[in-house]
Image: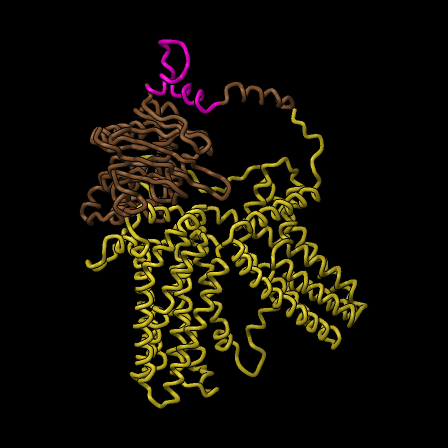
Chain colours: A brown, B yellow
Amino acid sequence: MNGIAIRTEQLTRRFGALTAVDSVDLRVSAGQFFGFLGPNGAGKSTTIKMLTGLLAPSSGRMELLGLDFQRNPIDVKRQIGVVPEGMGLFERLTGSEYLHFVGRMYGLDGATTEKRAGELLEFMQLADREKTLIADYSHGMQKKLALAAAVIHGPRILFLDEPFEGVDALAAGALKALLGRMTERGVTIFLTSHVLEIVERLCSHVAIIHQGRLVAQGSLEELRAGIPGDEGEKKTLEQIFLSIVGQSGGEQARLEELTWLT
Amino acid sequence: MADVIQMPGVTEQLKLIAGLRWNMLKNNLQRKNNRWDLIGMILAAAGGAVVVVGLCVAFYAGAYFFLTTGRASWMPLLYWAIFLWWQVIPILVAGFGANFEFRNLLRFPLSLRAFYILGLGYGFADFAAVSSLCWIASMLVAAAVGRVQLLPVMMVASLLFVLVNVTLERLIGSWLEKIFAKRRARELLVGLFVLSMVSMNFLNLAMQHWGGRGSRPRILHLVAYFSWLPGSLAGNAVAAASDADTQSLVLTVGGLLVWLGAASGLLWIRYRAQYLGEELSESAAPSAGKRGPRRRSVSLGLPGFLSPPVAGVMRKEFHYLTRNGFSFLALIIPPIMVIFFTMEFAGNNSQIREHGLPPQFFFPAAMAYLILILLSPAYNSFAFEGHGIQSYFMAPVRMRDVLVGKNLFLVSVVAVELVISLGVLVWRIGFPGLPLFLSTITAAAFAVMGQLAIANWSALSFPKKMEIGKMKGQRNSGVAVWTAFGVQILIGGIATIVLLAGRWSGNPWLPVVVFAGLTAAALGGYVASLDPLSVLAERKKELLIETLCR
């Protein structure tokens, strides 16, 4: 691992009276496959939006690849790829047209864009649909296209918001292999997913955000070590997650109150 | 066993829906942009109310005149006007009656009867229905004042007419909803519909051509063939009552009852199909491995000096234009309208010479019209981006590149349109002389350049999402509309003063020089605006993303 890829200091975002992200200090080393977890409404998407320039922070600092985001947004954006919430696709373009558009927006020349777009469409098993409008793609196909667009310029950091949602098992396997290769080449991958099994299988490091605050951060082993339990028992990420953010016993008590339903 | 003991009645359900809509409106107003939008809508509604009230007077006067001067046989004209309004306006305004919220009610345990009645209830809640009811009420008041003995029959005929109209409108709406559920059908039919609306402009010319002069136009003979339609039946019922013609009265009222029964039966069948879970969504995506429809890839040759992002945006705009039937038609319509104007005023039927207006009037007027039509979308230029708007903010580009790409593409399109339209004008009314020709071109250049910076500001500040191939809710923000209106009036005013100054001074080259200077100043202003607009885009990005990704 060479240096820090993502560093935030006291990163905060408020929406009126609500503090969605509260003084978050993240450290992600270059080349890490990093999982960013949290319950619904914890602040995951808000954090990703800030880290990718889709949302301005209320306060705090963000540094990507050693560059201050607020001061060098264009330079930072050149280095990152994003599959955002909602995927950010132009639905009235075909797959190849969209990849061509994205390539040009990142400053690639026409020939390189054309070559890479073709290869990516082939890899994503979208080559036979290169002339189909994105509006006519299934959700999973759109997801694969969004991922292709996020990597066409060879980013050094890749932000993925629920990248495997709706993607079939076959394609998901190929994508995981691709992402694995990318991290071997030193690309940092910052991933959010509600499917903890995927995060556990892919990620070496994890951070957990809860009610806007970062409540845990480290390698899976470090997090396991911090959870009380039987010696020698290998805890799953789900158990770690629940023990950190779940109010143990609280749900059960509330369940008992629903007497009219249970 | 669910705990539901008693279902709420239809009235209770209507109250619940009214409450839901009120809460949605109230919550929407918490956003500043929506408040501005509301003000725009209120102004538009005030204008609409003036038209409706004005026409109430007209319907009252018409009905009073027909009923008190022995012209009751003309009453079908009034009912026909209402019939057409009631059936056509919902198509134009409400997007073919596809009422998502109404269909959503099927999630709840409604009976088919309640679903049907609620459907009709929705039919009474649109602008066309409310205005039509006002006009019918005006006609009834006229009957009460002018010939009170006709009032009972007129009330019965009007009641049946209202029920037929609302049922028919819902029936047409539900069928169109079914047809329009498919994207391709939707886009094709919307295009054909817009084209047919435009071609209606040629009706007058057709009537002049085939109607004959001095005698009853032949086209009016066709009206007799429509006597079995609701507009004629309701009017003829009143006329029959006026003439004490019981047989005709029974026939016409019976005809309305047949219409009502048939429309109700068909609507019941449609609603029953919906009630039973008719699938209206797009068909599932084709399975993997099967090739999708091939599209011919149209390449857009762009000059090499453009930066990759600007070229990328221009190419994307080109693809969007070719796939947006509505926008595409908007390009065809202006030259068609120029042909229409010249046929109307400068051809064989020229009215312009009769009124002593010089034909050259058309050059600046036609250009003003074109720019009015073609520049309007620029005030909401991100409308069709959808989730794609995020791409602009994720990519390493400044918004100035995006704006320049969009504006360059628009200017190219406007230039092509102007050239075609100028060609049509020269063909139809001759070359107007070099000074006026150049004045027209420089005035057009000023009108375009003068608007772009403000249009960009409007597009960033008051975005409104639109969807290709849909008509329902496809409107710009109220503020954007009023901004465009104000700017175009201002620029039109300046251009008129400059053109008149050339005429009064006797120097035909004066407007050319002034417009060239104004264009240069506008271009300077435009270039200077790009950086501040990039800063504004950063400030407004959350609003843009939230509005367009919704």
The residue at 35%/26% (across/down) is A217
Furthest residue to the right? Answer: B149
Q: Where on the picture, by quarter, is residue B530?
A: bottom left
Please say whether residue B285 is visible from this viewpoint.
Answer: no
The magenta stretch spans residue B125: no
The residue at 39%/70% (across/down) is B370
The residue at 48%/42% (across/down) is B281
| Residue B309, placed above or below residue B77 | above
Please say whether residue B268 is visible from this viewpoint.
Answer: yes
**Nearest to the observer: residue A258 or residue B312:** A258
- Total number of numbered discs in the rendering: 0
Residue B125: image location, x then y, percent: 63, 53
Q: Which residues are magenta?
A: A222-246
The magenta stretch spans residue A232: yes
Residue B188: image location, x then y, percent: 42, 54
**Nearest to the observer: residue A214 or residue B526:** A214
- Quarter occupied by the N terminus of chain B: top right
| Residue B416, placed above or below residue B180 | below
Residue A165: image location, x then y, percent: 38, 32
**Nearest to the observer: residue B111 or residue A260:** A260
The residue at 31%/60% (across/down) is B409
| Residue B395, placed above or below residue B215 | above
Q: Where on the picture, by quarter, is residue B452?
A: bottom left
Residue A59: image location, x then y, percent: 39, 42
**Nearest to the observer: residue B487 or residue B362:** B487
Question: Is residue B422 toward the left or the right of residue B264 in the image?
Answer: left
Furthest residue to the bottom? Answer: B506
